[in-house]
């Protein structure tokens, strides 16, 4: 995080204006704008939320209430690699508890924590709609890693650690 | 095996590309609907087909569309439900990622039928790839004149926008979805009024599931009678069944509505690994009551599953073999609902928490549970039903009650032993209090 007030890049501002055009009410653009802000600034810090409120001319309380409701908006800075291990029934039936335990052991952190060097953070999430390839984890809200075993999970961590 | 329609992507490589899709008859349904049918005729065709919603509730689609006000100065919106968060369900993701134009055709035809000019597809935030692919499909279709102003020269205008969720199961509930589209927390609204009269931005709105809309082009091309003749007449059509858990071949299977559950598990999904015995099956996503091994000779259509005491729901079939502890299973499900309750209603907010707490005590409590906890679960579940804003509370209570009543001896054994008989050790290397 820089110490200056956050500010969208020109490209992000253009994207923001395009988003506004999709909705008859400005407030409806809040979710996509928060996504944009998270992409631009990495996470939704209080100054970022203030910036979004000011940009969208919405009360800060509305922006904060929405941002805090959704788990994929990060209100704390995640690790460089944020591991989201699914824990719901189909994954649990196929070894998700063992995957989580292996990640915790390898990284020395528990679910909800971040490594001291800031490289990794771990979160347990609910069904990722990939139960046919359980167990599953997602990295940084995007990439799916499917049909995991403990070995494959540890290999993934090694690979991420070196990038 | 019968012809696949919803899953043509399994047979045609690169079907997600517009050129490939068009080369295989793509957008003929759109052309036929927009150039030869009036909106009223299309609503009639969908009604006659007996198509029922694939999102979980099974409501007749044509009937829902006919609830829109006949005369209105307000715009009509279509909100496509691609939140797909019901545990055990992964069919909509497949359509969005592999065959987005099939869905887009369904959206265009349905929008035309309900006189809608702006449709939003609410895609759960985790589907980053799906959102990207769907945006690409929209851009291709717009370029080709299937979207935007004056679609196919018919004078019909339609914009379709992707709206991404950001992690919240409750946004799959149709009014939670609408709130979320409006930029708010996904708090479900009290109904009535229903979205058909007061929905998105206070305007008439239809919310339909991805798979529901994907059926529409096929109905237009092949006719309502063709659709109604597949499976039971009151709950017909091709259907996507998602099979997960302890089966040899987990996956999505397109089969006629009414295919027996036993056949799906043992023939299509290959049965249970290691020839272990079946212990239980959840037939319709985590919200639905479990079937025991003796209850699987049920045709998988909406009315038959309901008659057998559960619901087809999202058709997420989760299979448990004999090694699975049913108290643990109930706990994993209760934890999900506790995590996802939006907290507006006291019975739901408190009840989901209590269910999880008591189940955890039975499973991991090391002697702290008592025999009374088994009835306490039934008591809590009973107080959660029928009194809340949305159906999540019932969806948490119903399965909990079914686990306790159908596997009661196992629950009592946990209480008597003071531990889980299936796993003598404590929660595996779990070093913190919340699971
Ligand atoms: C708690 C809850 C979660 C739901 N989640 C979904 C979902 O993820 N996807 C979906 O299509 N419908 C979901 N539904 C059902 C919707 O409210 C709605 O009935 C459905 O989208 C209507 O579309 P259909 O008639 O085409 O099935 C959910 C309902 C509840 C009560
Ligand atoms: S029943 Fe539960 S999820 Fe539904 S509105 Fe009430 S508190 Fe929220
Ligand atoms: S339970 Fe993990 S993806 Fe569905």
Image (cartoon, grey):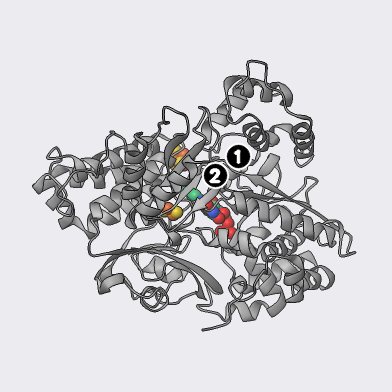
Q: Residue at x 29, y 42 (%)?
A: B355
x then y, percent, for residue B417? 9, 48
Q: For this view, does B354 lie left or right of residue B60?
A: left
Q: Residue at x 62, y 24 (%)?
A: A49
Instruction: Compute the Cα span from label 1 to label 2.
Output: 7 Å
Q: Is residue B68 visible?
A: no
x then y, percent, for residue B90? 50, 59
Q: Residues within 10 Å of mark 1 (few under 14, many from 20)?
A: many
Q: Residues within 10 Å of mark 2 (few under 14, many from 20)?
A: many
Q: For this view, does B273 lie left or right of residue B16?
A: left
x then y, percent, for residue B121? 66, 51
Q: Chain of mark 1?
A: B
Q: For this view, does A32 lie left or right of residue B433?
A: right
Give the quadrant of residue A5. top right
Circle 2: element type: helix
> Is there a contact, CB below 8 Å, between mark 1 and mark 2?
yes
Above-or-below relation of A35 to B51: above
Q: Residue at x 58, y 64 (%)?
A: B60
Circle 1: element type: helix
Q: Residue at x 58, y 31 (%)?
A: A66
Quadrant the C terminus of chain B occupies: top left
Q: For this view, does B142 lie left or right of residue A91?
A: right
Q: Is residue B166 visible?
A: yes
The label on residue B180 is 1
Above-or-below relation of B434 to B42: above
How many marks on residues? 2
Q: Chain of mark 2?
A: B
Along the line of sight, the residue nearer the viewer: B24 or B189: B24
The label on residue B171 is 2
């Amino acid at each position: 995080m820089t110490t200056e007030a956050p500010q969208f890049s020109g490209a992000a501002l253009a994207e923001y204006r395009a988003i506004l055009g999709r909705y008859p009410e400005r407030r409806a653009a809040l979710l996509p704008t928060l996504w944009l802000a998270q992409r631009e600034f990495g996470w939704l810090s209080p100054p970022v939320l203030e910036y979004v409120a000011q940009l969208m001319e919405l009360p800060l309380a509305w922006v904060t209430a929405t941002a805090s409701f959704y788990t994929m908006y990060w209100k704390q800075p995640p690790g460089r690699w944020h591991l989201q291990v699914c824990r719901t029934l189909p994954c649990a039936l196929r070894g998700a508890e063992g995957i989580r335990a292996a990640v915790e052991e390898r990284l020395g952190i528990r679910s909800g924590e971040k490594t001291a060097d800031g490289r990794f953070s771990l979160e347990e999430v609910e069904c990722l709609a990939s139960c046919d390839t359980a167990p599953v984890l997602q990295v940084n809200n995007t990439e799916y890693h499917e049909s995991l075993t403990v070995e494959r999970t540890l290999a993934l961590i090694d690979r991420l650690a070196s990038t | 095996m019968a012809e696949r329609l919803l899953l043509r992507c399994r047979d045609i490589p690169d079907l997600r590309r517009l050129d490939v899709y068009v080369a295989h008859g793509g957008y003929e349904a759109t052309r036929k609907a927009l150039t030869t049918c009036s909106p009223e005729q299309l609503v009639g065709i969908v009604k006659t087909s007996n198509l029922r919603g694939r999102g979980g509730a099974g409501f007749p689609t044509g009937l829902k569309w006919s609830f829109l006000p006949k005369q209105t100065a307000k715009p009509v919106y279509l909100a496509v439900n691609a939140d797909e968060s019901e545990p055990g369900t992964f069919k909509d993701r497949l359509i969005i990622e592999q065959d987005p134009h099939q869905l887009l055709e369904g959206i265009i035809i349905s929008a035309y039928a309900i006189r809608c000019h702006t449709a939003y597809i609410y895609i759960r935030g985790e589907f980053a790839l799906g959102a990207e692919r769907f945006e690409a499909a929209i851009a291709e279709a717009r370029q080709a004149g299937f979207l935007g102003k004056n679609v196919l020269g018919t004078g019909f205008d339609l914009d379709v926008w992707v709206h991404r969720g950001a992690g919240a199961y409750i946004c799959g509930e149709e009014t939670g979805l609408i709130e979320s589209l409006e930029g708010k927390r996904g708090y479900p609204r009290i109904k009535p009024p229903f979205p058909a009269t007061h929905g998105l931005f206070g305007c008439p709105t239809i919310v339909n599931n991805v798979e529901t809309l994907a059926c529409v082009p096929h109905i237009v091309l092949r006719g309502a009678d063709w659709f109604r003749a597949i499976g039971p007449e009151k709950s017909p059509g091709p259907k996507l069944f998602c099979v997960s858990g302890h089966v040899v071949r987990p996956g999505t299977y397109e089969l006629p509505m009414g295919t027996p559950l036993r056949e799906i598990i043992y023939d299509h999904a290959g049965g249970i690994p290691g020839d272990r015995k079946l212990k239980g099956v959840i037939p319709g996503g985590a919200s639905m009551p479990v079937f025991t091994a003796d209850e699987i000779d049920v045709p998988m259509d909406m009315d038959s599953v309901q008659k057998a005491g559960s619901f087809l729901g999202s058709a997420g079939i989760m299979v448990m073999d004999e090694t699975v502890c049913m108290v643990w299973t109930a706990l994993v499900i209760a934890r999900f609902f506790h995590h996802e309750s939006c907290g507006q209603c006291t019975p739901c907010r408190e009840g989901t928490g209590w269910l999880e707490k008591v189940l955890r005590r039975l499973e991991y409590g090391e002697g702290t549970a008592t025999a009374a906890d088994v009835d306490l679960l039934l008591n809590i579940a009973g107080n959660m039903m029928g009194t809340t804003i949305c159906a999540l509370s019932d969806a948490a209570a119903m399965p909990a009650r079914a686990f306790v009543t159908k596997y009661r001896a196992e629950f009592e054994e946990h209480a008597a032993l003071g531990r889980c008989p299936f796993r003598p050790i404590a929660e595996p290397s779990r070093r913190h209090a919340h699971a």
